[in-house]
Image: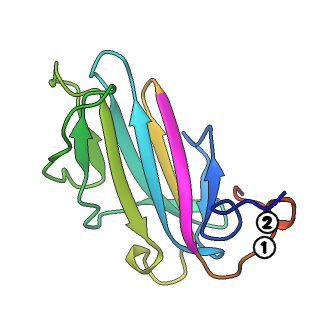
Amino acid sequence: MHAYGLGRVLNVVAAASGVHIPLRQGTAVTFITYLDAGTQVATIKQSINGASEAALDCDVYPHKSPGTGGTWTAMAEQDDTLDLSTDATNDSMVFTVLATSLADGYDCVEVTVNAGICVAVIHDLNVQRKPANLARNVV
């Protein structure tokens, strides 16, 4: 069976909090977070093949929304930390990190959430493959 998205335009890391995601196979990664309380904090770092972590201070243009439906609202970036801890209405965030946002020599992105769910979608794949032939998506 052919997968129309997986392997063709995207790859997915379902449990992405605290793992290093290489941006060698795609040009961007979008993170989707959710916590049914709106008290989530996401910290963004960059690394060199999973080592030499450093804060990633880039324009990620985050948006927030209620977890079930609702309208996406733009958030202000807060350096390398995105914070929903004082928001009682919105309990989901989405933000994209471009491979070009990484500092020279860095090739991985790590997002850690203090609680809840964090899914990563690696997209704009450089090479299209069958899902079974996709490159490893974490370091």
Q: Where is residue 65 in the image (x, y as percent from the top left)?
A: 24, 35
Tell me the element at label 1.
Answer: loop
Quadrant placement of the C terminus: bottom right
Q: At 23% across and 55% down in the image, what residue appears? A: 79
Q: Earlier in the sequence, mark 1 or mark 2?
A: 1
- Which residue is under mark 2? 134
Q: Which amino acid does label 1 sit on?
A: Arg
Left or right relative to 102: residue 72: left
Q: In which quarter of the image is residue 1?
A: bottom right
Over which residues does the magenta segment extend? 117-124
Q: Where is residue 129 in the image (x, y as percent from the top left)?
A: 78, 73
Q: Is the magenta stretch mostly helix, strand or loop?
A: strand
Left or right relative to 139: residue 104: left
Query: Magenta segment: does it hold 122?
Result: yes
Check if mark 1's residue and mark 2's residue have beta carbons within 8 Å.
Answer: yes
Q: At 44% across and 24% down in the image, what residue appears? A: 115
Tell me the element at label 2.
Answer: loop
Q: Position of residue 97 (x, y in %)?
A: 40, 64
Query: Magenta segment: does it hold 109?
Result: no
Q: At 58% across and 43% down in the image, what residue appears? A: 16
Front position in the image: 74 or 3: 3
